[in-house]
Structures are given as structure tokens and as C-alpha cells.
Amino acid sequence: MERIGGYLVERKLGEGGMGTVYLARTRGGRAVALKVARAELAADPVFRERFRSEVEAARTVGGFHTAPVVDADVDGDPLWLATAYIPGPTLAARLAAEGALDEPRLRALAAALAEALESIHARGLVHRDLKPGNIVMADDGPRVIDFGIARAVESTRLTATGTAFGTPGFLAPEQALGNDVTGAADMFALGAVLVAAAGGCAWGEGTPMGLMYRSVHEPPDLSAVPPGLADLVAACLAKDPAARPTPTELLDRLEGVETEPGEQGKQGKEGEQGEREAGQSVSYVPTVTGVPTPPQVPATPAQVPWTPVHLPPAQATPQHLPPTPSTPPHLPAPPSTPPQFAPLAAASPVPYGFGPPMPYGPPEAVLADGEARVVVNATGVILEVAGVAADFEWAEIATVGRTPSSRGSRLTVTVQLWDGSVYPCELNARRSARLTEWLGLLDHTLARYLAR
């Protein structure tokens, strides 16, 4: 077996924007998540310098609710980072399998995430991409992963694509607008995570551009949030970064401790006081210990299905997604049988990533008009509208729908994630022959990757 930096590599766990993640072991047998940077990133001097500074800061982050950095090589070839291996499903997978959390579990989740951000912010770091896929539901409580390298990846991604770093639906307004980002952006993402964990979508569903527009200009949809937490979540989702609570202030509010006026906006200062005593924090309610099986997306007979070539039509799952409801429903209960369309990384017990995946490698299918673009390749699916791109790994994709218009030559490609998020992208082929070509190319590529 291969060794990297003295660690014995056992198997691949997943891929993301930074590179490939492996399950590896020390000489003494202790498991680590070994994250190896892509060669094209490592060749960028800006990335190397930021990677060095971010890793050094990340190594000082402690606490019960993060995956601590245990080792790294910031000068070698390849560049790599080793963090403690945390077994357990991501929050996204847990929600897909078991549905929304009740209020006690939402409070426990909020407290755990606030403590994690308290530790991260105290060391001068900002996560920048907090979302259900970057939260592992471990036996001893939720853990935040993939902190400490976000700024390094962000610098290269901005240079390469000219788009905002992060995940639409969890991006703070200042991130969506390309302004300076502080720890307050993580608190905004925490609020959006709590809405998702309650079974809702803070900004509804739609294109990445639409989600970012609503996060900047419209109030969040808190209809799924229990009344006892609605004010707290609304405070996290304030448009003004200074109006959002700090992690410590959020913990105080969860415990019923009054915050003095004017204390909000002092992001990260309270984190210097060190770890909270165990008796002060909201207790964690244990969740599942294994990897749940993601559910099938309910069929919609009235829509045009896409049937993979290796399944008979009677067993295929229709790929067109249902229309967006006015109030997002709770996520479905776990199925009795595994889904017929498992993501590429389904064999990996814990899909660790590095934020949004990046469009590296030769694409298998590229559909584009003057305004929008869809790329499907071995990494996943990229949807781009008016220069704003959203990248999705196969590990987080439940289904990919494609619906040609009954009139004209338009095609809508829709990505639905295991956490229930839906992202459509409409293309104009302009000619029926080109639309037919697109459908054939897309079906061939989806049969190759989605049905694995």
C-alpha cells in the first residue's frame, strides 16, 4: 500500500475543491483523514503561501467539536494535511435518511456548532463554507470539518473562475457580494444550517444566482423552524454582519443568559476566554452511529423520466423533480431498500471534502448557451448562470433531472442533493437538432456516473 508522509493509505474517502482525501493510519495504527492537494493547486505560489499560513493557524484550534489538524507538509510535493478521522455520517446524509431534527436536537446542534466556531474564530480563522455536508455527526456530538484551508482554496478558485467561494443557500450577503468576510459570515451560515436541519430552506429553492439574490435582498423563510428558536435563527441570518450574534453570544442565548446591549458584532473576542466548561453547554443528544442509506427521491409520474440503460423502466426512478412547494416539506424517512442511484462515493463511510468541488479534469458532457452552462464529469455536476457557478460532488447528489420543453428548444437540468436542496439550470439549444444532441450526450454521461 502507498505511503504519504509516513502514513499508510488504506482507501480513498472522497474528493473536493482542494484535492483527494484518504483514510490512512499512523505507524501505531491510529486513523487519520489525509487530504492531498491537487497538483495544479500546489503549483500555485499564492495557494502554497496561504496553505502554509492557514495550516499553521488551524493546528492551534482545539475543542470537542472540530476535527483537529495533527500533521501537515506545507513545503513538499505533494502538499498534504492530516486531521483526526471522525467516523459518522454528515449532517446532510443524516437529514436525508431520518428527516428534520426536533427542537431539542436543533438546540444541541446549534450549541455544538457555536462552540466549534468559537474555537476556530479565536485563532483568527473563518470557515467560509459551513454547511450540512461539512458537519459530521459523530458518536460524541457534531464535528465541523474542513476549516483552516478555506482561504487558501478560495484565492485560487476566485482566480480560476471569477465566482464567489462557498455554497449558495449558506453564503452570507457579504460573501455573495464579494465583500470582506469575517467570522460573522460563519454565523450566517450556521443560521442557514439550522433552517435546513429543521426541514426548511432559508432562501427557498432555485438557481444559485436566485439563492444569492434572496440572501442579500429578501427575508429568510423560517416557517420550518420551531417558534422557540425562530428569533435566534433570525438573528444569525441578519443582513448586517454586526447585528449577528457571536458564537459566545449564541451559546449564552441558548442557555438563557442575557447579553448586554452593544455586545453583538464583537466577532471572535469571547473565544479567547478558552473552552467552556462541560456543564455550561447544551448536552448533545446522540444520533446515528453508522452511515445511513440516502432515500430515493419520490417519483413524479406526470413528468418525463430519465431511465438508465441498465435498469428496466418499471424499476427506474423518474429524474424530473417535483415543483417547489411554498413551504418546504420535511425530508423523507429512510427507505427499506437502498436507492437505485447511489453517488460515486457511496462506498466511503464518511465523505470528507474541501468545500465546493472544482471543475478540474476533462469534462464528459458540456452543454452551454450564451447565458448558462452545465458540465457533467467524473467529479460531479457544475451549474453556471450568468457567471455564477455552483459545483456539486457525486457524493452529495441524489438525482439529476433533465426536462426538455414541450415547445421550443429549451432544456432544464436540475440537481437535487441528499439534503433536499434543488438547483435548476435552464439552457436554450435554439435548434431541435442541438437539443437532441444534448439529450443524448447527457443521458450517456448520467448513465456512466449517476447509476454507479
Image (cartoon, rainbow, N blue to C red):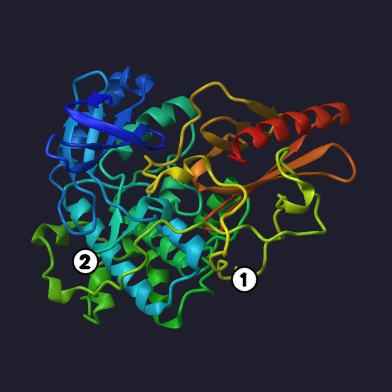
The residue drawn where x is 38% and y is 69% is 235
Q: Residues within 10 Å of mark 1 (few under 14, many from 20)?
A: some
Residue 139 image-quadrant placement: bottom left
Residue 90 image-quadrant placement: bottom left
The residue that disc 2 covers is 248
Q: Quadrant of the N terminus?
A: top left
Lateral position of residue 308 relative to residue 228, left or right: right
- Rounded to the nearest whole Å, what is the CA distance between mark 1 and mark 2? 31 Å
Lateral position of residue 9 relative to residue 198, left or right: left
Query: Closest to the observer: 43 or 258?
Result: 43
**Residue 237 visible here:** no
If you read the primary sequence from the N terminus, does the residue marked by circle 1 or circle 2 appear first? 2
**Residue lying furthest right:** 407
Secondary structure type for disc 2: helix
The residue that disc 1 covers is 327
**Residue 125 visible here:** yes
Q: Is residue 62 above or below residue 437?
A: below
Query: Closest to the observer: 158 or 79?
Result: 79
| Residue 341 percent location from the top left of the image | 61, 47
Q: Quadrant of the C terminus?
A: top right
Nearest to the eye among marks 1 and 2: give it.
1
| Residue 383 percent location from the top left of the image | 60, 38
User: Residue flagged by tag 2: what amino acid is it?
Assistant: Thr
Total number of numbered discs in the rendering: 2
Q: Residues within 10 Å of mark 2 (few under 14, many from 20)?
A: many
User: Residue flagged by tag 1: what amino acid is it?
Assistant: Thr
| Residue 64 percent location from the top left of the image | 19, 59
Could you say which disc has been placed on residue 431 in the image?
Answer: none
Query: Closest to the observer: 293 or 182?
Result: 293
| Residue 240 percent location from the top left of the image | 39, 59
The residue drawn where x is 35% and y is 20% is 39
